[in-house]
Amino acid sequence: MSSTAVLGCMFGDEAKAKIVDVLANNSDFVVRFQGGSNAGHTIVSNGKKIVLHSVPSGILYDKTVCILGSGVVVDPFALNEEITQLEKQGINVSNRFFIDPRAHIVLPIHQELDSKSENDKRNRTKIGTTKKGIGPTYADKSARFGIRFSDLYNIDYLKERLTNLYFSHHLEISKEEIDKLVESLSEISKKFEPFKMQVPYFINEQYEKGADIIFEGAQGTLLDIDYGTFPFVTSSHTVSGSITIGCGISPKKIDRIVGVFKSYFSRVGEGPFPTELFDEIGNTIREQGHEFGSTTGRPRRCGWFDAIAAKYSAMINGVDEIALTLLDVLSGLKTIKICTAYIIDGKRTLEFPYDTNSLNNCVPEYIELPGWNEDITKIKKYDDLPKNAKNYIESIEELMDKKVSIVSVGPDRNQTIFRS
Ligand code: IMP
């Protein structure tokens, strides 16, 4: 029996999809348990780039079955488009892609509400969301006005629920508008009918049978609704605890937790970022790392590796081992810094603060390590990495008291170094 969780442990965009893709080679199932089409998962195989938003990253392997658990929010229109694009590229999803009927549906109203609140001048806390309607959908789920995937298969009930949903937002919708929306949803739901799956029964049974399962996280720990930099977070739980709720499996059945960390930090959207770089080095990292959002195209903010935030994240998730990605991006820097403490109001701390103000006011304390100039993108063995690159990795290991078991030195599958 074996299950592995692959989780982003920073502000998202840690290149989790690449790690899932590499590990999915040996996996029977890849299951997503939270988030929605706000995620942008980029995979490069043989030079070909594929960006996934809702479909799990195992879809590129013919034998891997991909599943969305109840904790995911599904935009049926966006998903339909994503599947059509995959099919055009020769990737067939039939009998290989399933959705829990409990999953909530993202509707146009949710995207409108998301955009409206982000654009409204009266809103003093702009989050910088992806405007994919994620927050309003999860809010409606908690408020019990949301629409579930299963509701698409009962037209009368769906109409009633939609009317109620609009009522809950104090919005008017005519019978004709409801009928039109239901009609377009019905068309998609016919196509999606074979995707319906009782995920908790299926996944538990498969685990007992000894299947190899990957739980694929979206976004990152520091965007978790509770443990992230609230309110500058996404609206779901992104941490390992969310797996059990988001697909109906016991925590006892998560055997291995791989924390994905970038070799530096990045963030897209608003919110505190203690080690953010505003200088040429930040620009160099952004350019070399192609740090532009895969969902929104926005430039990502870049900064030094923050061992305080990383340790906090590893603790909350129970990370067993680290996958360190984008190491190649740091090649050419004369020196590289790692944040090892925060100074807040004159006091030194090793704890990640719970409030945004402290994070905004904290002054990072750094250690400085020598960089390397060599191109490392073709290196296959750990021992062949430049001495200073190994020193950087081993410093992270020491600071975090965790093993770096995977090092990624480029976007392609084969640019991955496994350490025994
Ligand atoms: P939302 O998830 O669209 O509501 O956006 C909330 C915050 O999470 C914003 O700062 C987004 O930029 C960020 N976010 C959402 N999804 C991702 C992701 O997949 N990668 C990185 N940041 C994300």
Image (cartoon, rainbow, N blue to C red):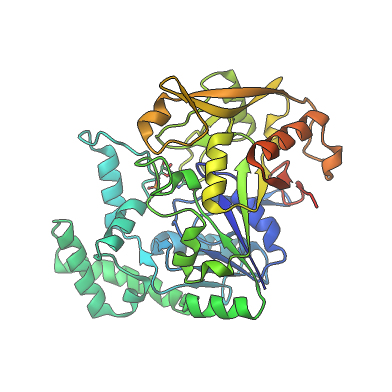
Quarter of the image containing the N terminus?
Answer: bottom right
In the image, 356: left or right of 290?
left
Report how many numbered discs are placed on residues in the image: 0
Q: Quadrant of ligand 1?
A: top left
Taking depth in this image into account, of 252 and 34 the one nearest to the observer is 252
Residue that appears at 27% across and 50% down: 112
- Give the x, y percent position of residue 292: 53, 37
382 horizontally vs 30: left or right: right
Question: Image quarter for residue 271?
Answer: top left
Left or right: residue 278 versus residue 329 is left
Residue 72's image quarter? bottom left
Residue 170 image offset from top left, x and y in percent = 13, 56
Of 178 and 165, which appears nearest the observer? 165
Say which of 172 and 117 sits in front: 117
Q: Position of residue 108 (x, y in %)?
A: 30, 57
370 is higher (above) or lower (below) than 411:
above
Q: Measured along the vertical axis of the image, is residue 356 above or below residue 284?
A: below
